[in-house]
Amino acid sequence: MMDWDEQLDDAVLAILSALHAEAGDERVHSAGPDMSLAKLSKRVEQRMSTLRRHLSALESAEIVNVTLNEDGTGRATLTPFGMAIFDALDESQAAAMA
């Protein structure tokens, strides 16, 4: 599991933010709250190998679920635990700015 005493880097926060935004976007709920890895890679401006490394760590920590297909494509989504973590981070940032 990830050590939460260490600061999350900007790349991981960008991934969490993009997945959180996708889950909250009502236009995509009919398709599900997950995001293709290709779209996520473009949105967070990370190479696929870097993205997959971050997602692997987040998946081990049970923050995201990643589904990979045989053709190399895949999808990622925040788990309920991941949603709660992101919401807590968001609230703490809002409190710090107030």
Image (spheres, helix red, strand yellow):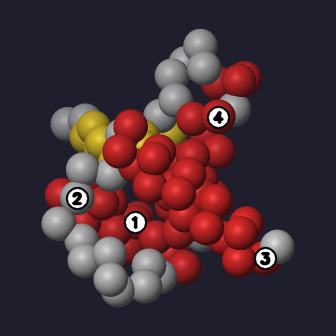
Label 1 sits on what residue type? Leu
The kind of residue on which mark 4 rests is Gly
The residue shown at (44%, 55%) is: 85
Residue 25: x and y in percent read 69, 32
Q: Mark 1 vs mark 4: which is more N-terminal? A: 4
Is there CB contact under 8 Å for labels 3 and 4? no
Which residue is located at x 53 percent, y 57 percent? 88
Comparing marks 3 and 4, which lies closer to the viewer? Answer: 3
Question: Which residue is found at the position 43% from the left and 85% from the top?
Answer: 7
Which residue matches tag 4?
24
Label 4 residue SS: helix
**Residue 60 horizontal/vertical position (percent):** 18, 58
Q: Which mark is residue 61?
A: 2
| Secondary structure at numbered mark 1 | helix
Any part of residue 36 in sight = no
Which mark sits nearer the N-terminus, 3 or 4?
Answer: 4
Compared with 23, 51 (above or below) is below
Q: Which mark is residue 97?
A: 3
Q: Which residue is mark 1?
A: 51
